[in-house]
């Protein structure tokens, strides 16, 4: 399978609290939203959330984790479409996974037709 051309545009809110990216390729358009909550009192209390949704067509996205802080480890709580999920026949199929990730990692998101993923990144204590 050859590489697909993808065009992406991103915007950020003041203070980089919210970052939204819209990508389009021959298969359609999709978007990703990143939300980072950093406070002085509890810097890892809310963490960062990444979300991805798709239309009626399955998509696979590779997401670099460059938005995570350098030299920090994160627990990712991943809520994703389960095997065989499809909004027309099996919309209830869900899988949950936990992984330890760092800034240099990449995640591959497999989005079922009409599906999506939500990932919460919680910074771990050093």
Image (spheres, grey):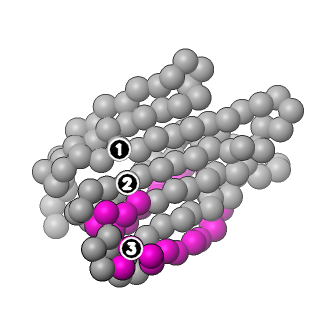
Give the mark nearer the N terminus: 3 vs 1. 1
Give the mark nearer the N terminus: 3 vs 2. 2
Separation of marks 1 and 2 at Cα, in angstroms: 7 Å
Give the mark nearer the N terminus: 1 vs 2. 1
Relative vertical location of residue 115 with respect to residue 73 in this rendering, above or below: below
Residue 10 visible somewhere in the drawing: yes
- Secondary structure under badge 1? strand
- Front-most of 56 and 15? 56
- Secondary structure under badge 3? loop
Relative vertical location of residue 18 with respect to residue 76 in this rendering, above or below: above
Q: Looking at the image, which residue is at 72% across and 33% down?
A: 38
On residue 31, the disc is 1
Decide: marks 3, 1 in contact (CB < 8 A)?
no
Q: Looking at the image, which residue is at 59% across and 71% down?
A: 97
Q: Image quarter for residue 78?
A: bottom right
Q: Looking at the image, which residue is at 56% across and 25% down?
A: 16
Q: Position of residue 71 (x, y in %)?
A: 69, 43
Say whether residue 101 is magenta: yes
- The residue that disc 3 covers is 91
Q: Image quarter for residue 61?
A: bottom left
- The residue that disc 2 covers is 53
């Amino acid at each position: 399978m050859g590489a697909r051309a993808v065009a992406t545009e991103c915007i950020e809110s003041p203070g980089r609290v919210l970052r939204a990216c819209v990508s389009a390729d021959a298969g359609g358009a999709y978007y990703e939203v990143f939300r980072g909550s950093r406070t002085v009192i509890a810097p890892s209390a809310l963490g960062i959330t990444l979300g991805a949704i798709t239309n009626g067509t399955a998509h696979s996205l590779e997401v670099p984790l460059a938005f995570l802080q350098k030299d920090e480890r994160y627990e990712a709580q991943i809520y994703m479409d389960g095997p065989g999920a499809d909004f027309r026949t099996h919309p209830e199929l869900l899988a949950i996974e936990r992984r330890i990730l760092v800034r240099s990692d990449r995640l591959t998101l497999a989005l079922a037709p009409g599906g999506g993923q939500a990932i919460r990144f919680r910074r771990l204590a050093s």
